[in-house]
Amino acid sequence: MGSTSFNMPSVKLTSTVMGCVVALHLLTAIVLVMVKTPVITIKPLEITPPIEIQLVSEVTTIAEPVMAVAEVEPIKAPKPQSVSVPEAKPEPKKAVQPVVRKEKPKPQVDTKPDTTTTKIVESKPVIKQPIKSQESDAAAQASALAADNERKILAAQTEKANQQTHAKAMREAQAAADTKAKADREAQAVSDAKAAQAARAKAEAATREKANQQAAAASNTPVNFTATNANWASAPSFSFPARARRGARSGETFRVVLVLQVNKQGSIDNVSLAQSSGNAALDRDAQQQVLSGKFKPFTKNGVPVVGNVTLPISYAAP
């Protein structure tokens, strides 16, 4: 199997991020192209013709004075009151003449029109400079347009920077996640290896223990050996017992067969009589005398075992 690098992001994630970045670049370019820059139209300068000023003096007309004649109304006589008095003829009254005041005529003023003319100096046509308001409006429009374009460019740059920052954060997060996943896998692998090793050691120990138990059980099971297969580490001393001489003829041979149970160390743990010699005293002494000896441990497949040895012993009466 090929080795897998866990430090590098996956090909799928890298392709996805690159596709997103390219799509955002294309979208930004399309937005900038679609933004239509307004065309600044400067109106042609209007040349205002010079204003001609002509001073004309107004003709003053002096009205002739009118002689005013005051009309005086006649004074009416009061009505007589009716009084009971003797009649008397009224005296005739004089008629009142109206008083006419004569005003002195004012001297007439010669009211000829003023023929004084003011000489008008023709001025050269003045070409007016461009209207400052139009210039200020055009400058304001240009400034607003430049500010709007700059704002859009800054917004696009900010959006691009935010996208790059987000993509970088995603890459770093993915790299951190990959590193953590790799560390977790390595730790899990180490833990699994330790657990497997412990399980193997436990299984091996159990197997060994079982084998030992089986071997011990097998070694504790007595294995039959003949006298020719037995090797004495220290042979016992057999002698015809004195108490067995009674009833025995000189030179008579007595044969007794014993079964010896030998432990793993070669010592004789138990003696049993397999065949009697016919002399009970001799049989008992033979069992006692054989206990003084010791065999070399019996083995089977290289493992010490308990052995049963059949040992014939011959005694000759003195």
Image (tube, grey):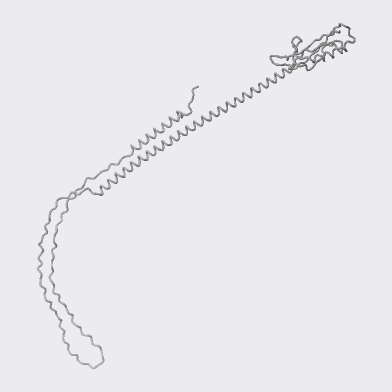
In the drawing, does residue 187 fall left or right of residue 167? right
In the drawing, does residue 108 fall left or right of residue 163? left
**Image quadrant in which you'd find residue 290:** top right
Q: Which one is in front, 258 or 296?
A: 296
Q: Give the percent coordinates (x, y) of residue 125.
A: 15, 50
Q: Give the percent coordinates (x, y) of residue 253.
A: 85, 7
Vertical side of 121 occupied by 278: above or below: above
Vertical side of 259 occupied by 72: above or below: below
Residue lying furthest right:
247
In the drawing, does residue 141 fall left or right of residue 10? left
**Image quadrant in which you'd find residue 101:** bottom left
Q: Give the percent coordinates (x, y) of residue 35.
A: 33, 39
Q: Give the percent coordinates (x, y) of residue 163.
A: 41, 36
**Image quadrant in which you'd find residue 241:** top right
Vertical side of 126 occupied by 236: above or below: above
Q: Which one is in front, 222 or 292?
A: 292
In the drawing, does residue 41 fall left or right of residue 277? left
Q: The C terminus appears in which quarter of the rendering?
A: top right
**How many labels, in total?**
0
Q: Which one is in front, 70 or 166?
A: 166
Residue lying furthest top:
251
